[in-house]
Amino acid sequence: MVKILTYFIAIFLLFGCKNEEKSTSEREKISENAIQKEENFGIVIHGGAGTILKESMSDSLEAAYKAKLKEAISVGYNILKNGGSSLDAVTHTINIMEDSPLFNAGKGAVFTHEGSNELDASIMDGATLNAGAVAGVKHIKNPIDLVRDVMQKSEHVMLYGAGAEEFAKSLGYKMMDTSYFYSQNRYESLQRVLQREKAQNEKKISFEDSYIKNSKFGTVGCAALDKHGNLAAGTSTGGMTNKRWNRIGDAPIIGAGTYANNATCAVSSTGWGEYFIRSVVAYDISALMEYKGMTLQEAAYEVIQKKVPALGGDGGIVAIDKDGNVAMEFNTAGMYRATMNSEGELVIKIYKEE
């Protein structure tokens, strides 16, 4: 009897130890997954999509674009790496591109038909679905900063023109002289477009050869996922060269140029704005993921390679989902783009065939 009792006690202890080992192993695995999930973050940026051809790009200019893309994304990456928010990463990353004459945003904004610069921008917080946007501002150095203040310090989502600048003044923003936004190459681009427009009006060239069909779109944008699982996206632009009548594109339109939702993804668009507005591009990508169960890449492909071209538009997006997967989808000859993951792996590309 004692032997039988001893046997059962031994069996109990054996299985108990094994279960304890299994339990400990499972706890360690759960803990490792939690740490891995906590450390999961990433960032992706664009500097515009359009007719960007290697044969038209000098080696020095290509190097300059890649260097600036690296500088910009590194700023956002370091914020995320140190536990900062996706909103901070998006804002400060876009600041770098707004301050560079290489991109059609801030300092490098293109000229309107009248020879002025009108800036648009937007930002969205995936955690709260709050958003901010401005359109048609002329004296704001960094519109991405202003849209964040619209989101966080006003009861509104979008402000326009003089009203947006009045709001900025109330917060102590310095109003830049319009000469700050002047760049010779952008002004010369306007003159070339005006000449082509005149020729088109005189029927010397067709619409297919006109600027609007063959220009690149230099909007800048960023989407990021932070260690806390929060997504954010932002977009900033000077719009389209030779735009008239206070034209507004997709960049400041929440759901078209910018969208972020912690349940799905964060998206920033660049392209022919009218078509991106009509297609509600940024939100559509999120909706396809939420309602049809598509992956980020599948949704981005569906919208950029099928829906937008079907209407006659072109351009691209950068996006990141809640798991850190990235999409950089475009249907033009090129798109300035870069991404960094939580491992610090950096990818920078310009042309389609890369």
Image (tube, rainbow, N blue to C red):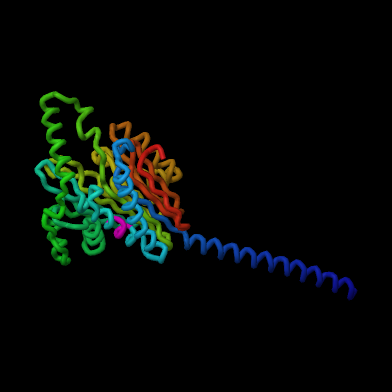
Magenta-tinted stretch: 90-94
| Front-most of residues 117 and 295 | 117
Vertical order, 124 against 27 (above or below): above
Which quadrant would the N terminus be assigned to in this image?
bottom right
- Does residue 21 appear left or right of residue 224 in this picture? right
Q: Residue at the spot x=49%, y=60% of the render?
A: 37
| Front-most of residues 167 and 243 | 243
Q: Residue at the spot x=38%, y=41% of the render?
A: 329
Is 92 magenta? The answer is: yes
- Does residue 149 appear left or right of residue 45 in this picture? left
Q: Position of residue 104 (x, y in %)?
A: 23, 47
Is 185 magenta? The answer is: no
| Image quadrant in which you'd find residue 18 | bottom right
Q: Residue at the spot x=42%, y=60% of the render?
A: 229
Q: Residue at the spot x=17%, y=25% of the render?
A: 205
Which quadrant would the C terminus be assigned to in this image?
top left
- Does residue 304 appear left or right of residue 198 in this picture? right
- From the image, give the main secondary structure of the stretch colored magenta: helix
